[in-house]
Image (tube, helix red, strand yellow):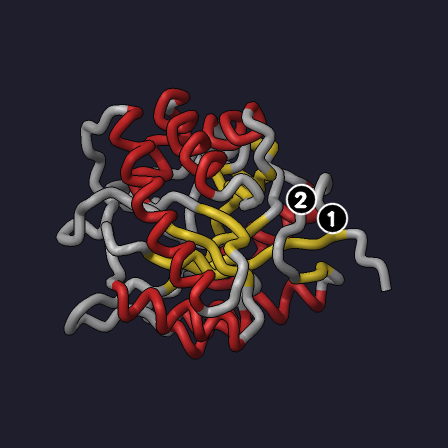
Amino acid sequence: MTHPYAVDLNCDLGESFGAYSLGHDEAILPFVTSANIACGYHAGDPAVMKRTVRLALQHQVAIGAHPGLPDLVGFGRRDMAISAEEAYDMTVYQLGALAAFVRAEGGTLHHVKPHGALYNMAALNPALAEAIAEAVYRVQPEACLYGLAGSALISAGRKLGLATAQEVFADRTYQPNGTLTPRRQPDALITDSATAIAQVVRMVKESRVRALSGEDVIMQADTICLHGDGPHALEFAQQIRARLEQEGIAVRPYSHPTTA
């Protein structure tokens, strides 16, 4: 059966480290199609990386590297004044670490998605975006670069000939310019599941999202981010997967048109 609509469901995983346990990795994997695995800077450690790669392979979920800023205390969600060269170096370092675990377990690295503040900074800063894209191109040129829909990161990846996936967020609100509402603002998160799911369905079927200002913003949805660390993350993943299938939307790992 051919589906007129298809989308990837990705989730940030492997965010435990040392004695600290975060998220619901094993429980949530049956409901997603791509896993973004932390690489040790904002979260994760070697043992967690290995375990999460193995779990993703067991569930036949596409594996991605999730490089972030070196900020365990702030979970990589605080801006840092880094240069483009530093962005390149830290991306190469983290991507190389995760790719080694994937290779050691007999898997294939499917994509790279920057985390948190690094992701948001690269969405707006062409120099950082180009540095991250260059790191992916040099280390894993066959990997797909996930970035905020319509952002500088998508443009940088395309310029280098990388496969790119435009990402939207189920549980976040948007600004009129297509950026995410900053987390420090009280209306940044959508806490009502029905509202979040309705937003996702509209983004997939109509390529539009309603900004907080009330205006519609064009927004291509190749892949949807689900956060795996919330108190209701598992329940939400189950609900959104079921609703997408009810709507006739195929849920599968993202495949770039040029590589499909």
The quarter of the rendered structure image containing the N terminus is: bottom right
What residue appears at the point 60 percent right and 30 percent down from the top-left corner?
161
Q: Give the secondary structure at mark 1.
A: loop
The residue that appears at 35% across and 26% down in the rendered structure is 128
Is residue 135 found left or right of 166 in the rendered image?
left
Q: Is residue 226 above or below residue 206?
A: below
Mark on residue 256? 2
Residue 194 location in percent, x, y? 52, 62
Crowding near the residue tagged with mark 2, few <14, some 14–19, many ≥20 C-alpha atoms within 10 Å: few
Q: Amino acid at mark 1?
A: Ala
Q: Residue at x 43, y 56 (%)?
A: 36
Q: Is residue 122 left or right of residue 40?
A: right
Q: Quick check: 32 above or below 204? A: below
Labels 2 & 1 near each other (Cβ < 8 A): yes
> Label 1: which residue?
260
Residue 112 visible to the viewer: yes
Question: Is 228 in front, or is 235?
Answer: 228
The answer to whether residue 195 is seen in the rendering is no
Label 2's element? loop
Q: How many C-alpha atoms fall within 10 Å of the one at disc 1: few (<14), some, or many (≥20)?
A: few
